[in-house]
Amino acid sequence: MDWITVLLYFVLVIIGWMNIYAAVYNEQHYIITDISQKYGKQLIWIITAFLLAFIILIIDESFYTAFAYVIYVIFLVAIILVPFLGREVKGSRSWFRFGEFGIQPAEFMKFAANLALAKFLSNQETKIADYKNTFITLLLIGVPMVIIKGLQDETGLAIVFVAFVFTLYREGLSVNYLLLGFLAIILFILALLINNLYLFIFIGVLCALALLFVRRNRKNLFIIAAIGVIACSMVKGTSYVYDKMEPHQKVRIDVLLGRGEVDLKKEGYNVNQAKIAIGSGGFLGKGYLQGTQTKYDFVPEQDTDFIFCTVGEEWGFIGSSVVIILQLTLILRLIYMAERQRSPFSRIYGYGVASILFFHLMINVGMTIGLAPVIGIPLPFLSYGGSSLWSFTILLFIFLKLDSHRLQILR
């Protein structure tokens, strides 16, 4: 057992519990084990998460490879059924409710997709460079992504599946795909910031300049023309998609890109209050349970998606840095562990775990300081919620189980 990883997990979970207590603390309910409050419920989730971790560790590691596709299908069916059988929470019907507690299947789809991806790519006959295998790989990732967004309207949970691109790159996906993805994002942003006519002219000029530096034959002319047409189509498509978005989605993009005047009492409120809370913490913070922005509920969702604001206000720059360093240390440790695996399945799965955690950390912290859109994804092991804590625990401890048996696997 890699006890360094276990220790990092335990420390982050305890830090999360302490900050959840600070985020919803009041003088009438101050006992940290009070299950009528969120911090009391989180304690139950933590205890059950530890129990889940123990169960995962006593199950034979071959179970996860043998039933990878079965687990994938089970949770795929669950995310399809939940909009019809689940209960609506905050405008989204993506939860199965059991009394006071709820389970969000989409959270568990992440580890299920990771298992299926590792199973498929670890096959000796699977070469990701082949177009057929690339298509199947993208299908394994894309199907749950489309279902979660289309049926449940959970944009944040759907976008998380993009994190698997880091795993695919490690397993041999051409860097050209990453480059095209990066350029597509840049083009998407420019299409929202610049008049489309000017952008069309700019693309045309770039294509003309490209012709000056390449050999002008039929093949190159076709490639440049195709790139120009695709780029112009993406610009037009971006404008079309933006116009069809829900008003709250448009607002989030406008706030991020600084388009026009943003009303800090309406659409810009969340991010502005988050910045105020984090900035008011200064270097050392206001002290535990002393955060005024936190205590008087100025920051929405401060125990879930915006838990980092509580850290920033009460623990300051030092405390925030410690939390981020702990998260990054865990991610780097997972990458180190993934590289020492003798089984391709374990290596791929390990990179998947690191990729998901990194993506969550990057987006969650980014949206609290205005560098990423507010899409509602939790900070790993810190945010309130049983589904997220359970899913991260399962995701991590399956890899710990696989890693603990690496020396028994022959090359």
Image (cartoon, rainbow, N blue to C red):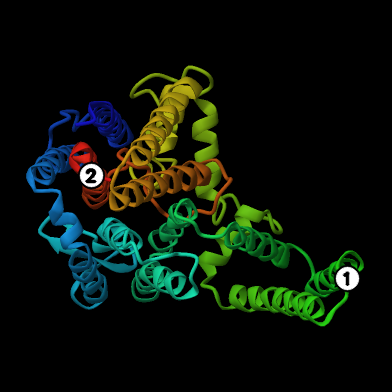
Mark 1 neighbour density, 10 Å: few (under 14) some (14–19) many (20 or more): some
Q: Is residue 294 left or right of residue 169?
A: left
Residue type indicated by callout 2: Leu
Sequence-first disc among 1 and 2: 1
Residue closer to the observer: 357 or 115:
115
Q: Quadrant of the N terminus?
A: top left
In the rendered image, residue 180, in percent from the top left (x then y), is placed at: 63, 63
Q: Which residue is mark 1?
A: 211
Place residue 115 in its image quadrant: bottom left
Q: Which mark is residue 410?
A: 2
Residue type indicated by callout 1: Leu
Q: Is residue 76 visible?
A: yes
Pointer 1 with pointer 2, Cβ within 8 A? no
The residue tagged with tag 2: helix, strand or loop? loop
Q: Residue at x 39, y 49 (%)?
A: 356
The residue tagged with tag 1: helix, strand or loop? helix
Place residue 27 in its image quadrant: top left
Residue at the extreme front: 411
In the rendered image, residue 86, in percent from the top left (x then y), is placed at: 20, 71
Q: Is residue 82 above or below residue 349?
A: below
